[in-house]
Image: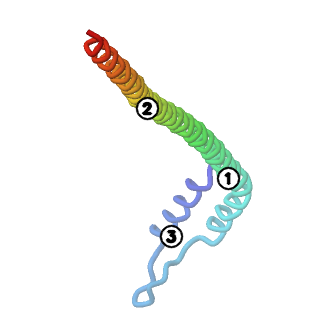
Amino acid sequence: MDVLKLLEELEEIIESGSSIPFAHKVMIDKEEVLEIIKEVRIHLPDEVKQAQWIKEERQRILVEAQQEADTIIQEANQHIASLVEQDEITKKACQQAEEITAQAQMGAKEMRLGAKDYADEILSNVEHTLNEVLETIKNNRGELKGMK
C-alpha cells in the first residue's frame, strides 16, 4: 500500500468511528489506527525518496532548459551582432564610395577650371602676340606706303 491509500484508510476509520455527543470527539480502534500509522512510517521513506528524486530530476531538467535557452539567446545575439556588423560594413563602404565619388567630381571640376584658365591664358598670349604682329604689319605697311 502506498502512503496516500493508508491515509485514506485512516480517514475512513475516523469518519466511521462512533461519535461522542456534544464533545466533537470520535471513538476509534486504537490498535487499528496505530497499525496504519506504522505502515505509513514504513512506506514514507520510499515515498520521500521518490519525491526527492522527482524534485532533483525536475531541478536538473530546469537547469538543462535554462542552459539551452542561454545558448540559444547567445547564438541569436551573435547572429544579430554579425548582421549589424555586416550592415555597418555596408554603410561604411557606401559612405567611402560617396566620398570617393565626391572627390573625383571635385578633381574633375578643378581640372576643367584649370584647363579653361590655361586655355584662356594661352589664347590671351596668342592674342597679345597677334596684336604685336598685327601692329608690326601695320607699321611695315605704313613704311611701304611712305616709300612710294
Query: Coloured how?
Result: rainbow
Which callout, 2 or 1, points at the residue further toward the start of the chain? Answer: 1
Mark 2 or 3, nearer chain start:
3
- Badge 1 element: helix
Dot 3: within a 10 Å radius of its alpha carbon, few (fewer than 14), some, or many (20 or more) residues? some
Please state which of residues 113 and 42 is positioned toward the viewer in this rendering: 113
Q: Which residue is mark 1?
A: 47
Question: Dot 1, how many residues are within 10 Å of its Cα: few (below 14), some (14-19), or many (20+)?
Answer: some
Measure the alpha-carbon separation of dots 2 and 1: 93 Å
Instruction: Return the residue found at the far bottom.
Output: 22
Q: CA distance from mark 3 to mark 1?
A: 24 Å
Rendered location of residue 142, percent (x, y) = 28, 17
Percent coordinates x, y for residue 45 in the rendering:
74, 56
Residue indicated by mark 2: 110
How many labels were placed on the picture?
3
In the displayed structure, would residue 138 be above or below residue 55? above
For badge 1, the amino acid type reads Glu
- Say whether residue 108 is left or right of residue 60: left
User: Residue 148's x, y, as percent?
Assistant: 26, 9
